[in-house]
Amino acid sequence: DWNNKSARSCRLSVREEELEFKCKTYEEMVIWARSVKYAAARSFHKFYILGKKIAEGRHSKVYFAHPRNSKIPNVYVVKVIRRTFDLESKERVEREFRIASSLEAHSHIVAAVDVFASTTIVHIVMEHMQGDTLAGMLVEYPVLPEMYARPVLLHMLKGLSYIHGENIVHRDIRPENIFCTGKRFPMELAIGDFGIANVIPDYKVNNNVLTTMTIADLFYIAPEMASGQSYGPAIDMWSVGVVLYRILSGSMPFVGCAGDIMGAVRRCELDTNSAFWTTVSPEATSLVRQLLHIDPFRRITAQAAANHQWFEPQRSLIIRRKLNENHPFRKMLVVAKAFIAVARLSMFASGRSITLRLNKSDRRLYLENSNEDSERGRPRH
């Protein structure tokens, strides 16, 4: 009764259930009642227009969308999730809805701009990341140089540090769920798709407490999960380690059929001793091993990883200067010198000239190599 100044509660009927809001004052009761009434009347289609479908999964569809008061297309992306009567699916939808509603704006988390929920459908309106996913980038560039791999990993770690601080475990970290603001570096990256994320109670946040989940991708599964043990935020760090291994080497650390992958992960059979890894800096290799540690309690955390020495300024220049004489890049320079010498002789014989053009980084290494040859008394070519 809105006119009853002595009223301290209001009732809300949802299907066959009835909820009662008890307040300290009449004014507080009115605020709650009006807020609930407004929320119940809100509808996605009153505020947004659906655009082209982008993707479709088992439980949801993803579309472009834009506000009704705007004619600019593809302003947002909206995830449309149908609620079902299946208990597991219902719990998953409710978790994603709560997590999307609770996360605050963060530069390395795909922001949920608006959330609508009815008895049958949940609409999660998200910012539109203008670039591709990290998975799409890796199709074009299977291996990333360390100078580009650093910001990719650092942005992932900062996003995970935030959600782990909010007691949220993502449980599906992989390149398909890392979104980019552009198609070329420099760019920002953000973690998205919290479809199978979960929340850990405060008093258990540092322990392995979760026991069940739908496995999204075996390639990124952590040993404790592969062994059927309880787990916690450390599973996300293992997945980050797999991503780092992949972007540095162009291959996955654990391959084969499902049984082979699960067995290799449980034994943590990690190869960082192959010829390729001699081209990777010791700091990067160290971080890979700390992320892919078989013991979740000794695995590096997101915050600690973000402070790893691999991310120190100017580290890339120092590392490249310390490369030994057998480094493949130096061998490539020797071959390039010989090729250029032959080409110049050919051009000279034909009366034409040739100009060697190197970028700043390659030119620096070229000059260093030449200086070293000179100091050793070797003739320059």
Image (cartoon, rainbow, N blue to C red):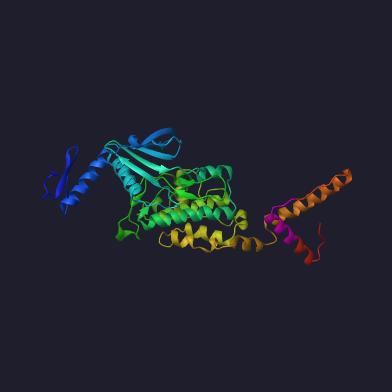
Quarter of the rendering occupied by the N terminus: top left
Give the residue drawn at x 36%, y 53%. Answer: 168
Within the image, what quadrant is residue 34 found in? top left
Query: Is residue 358 highlighted in magenta?
Result: yes
Give the residue drawn at x 51%, y 57%. Answer: 288
Q: Does residue 368 lie above or below 188 as drawn?
A: below
Q: Does residue 88 lie above or below 26 as drawn?
A: above
**Total residue callouts:** 0
Query: Is residue 198 highlighted in magenta?
Result: no
**In this rendering, would 255 be left or right of 350?**
left
Q: Position of residue 258 (x, y in %)?
A: 45, 44
Quarter of the rendering occupied by the C terminus: bottom right
**In this rendering, would 278 be left or right of 380?**
left
Asked if one can make out residue 194 in the rendered structure from this viewpoint, the answer is: no
Q: Position of residue 272 (x, y in %)?
A: 56, 56
Q: As rendered, which of 188 and 96 lies closer to the eye?
A: 188
Main secondary structure of the magenta stretch? helix
Q: As rendered, which of 138 and 101 lies closer to the eye?
A: 101
Within the image, what quadrant is residue 58 found in? top left
Asked if one can make out residue 148 in the rendered structure from this viewpoint, the answer is: yes
Residue stretch in magenta: 357-369
**In this rendering, would 256 be left or right of 14?**
right
Give the residue drawn at x 38%, y 39%. Answer: 79
Q: Position of residue 329 (x, y in %)?
A: 68, 55
Q: As rendered, which of 20 and 120 lies closer to the eye?
A: 20
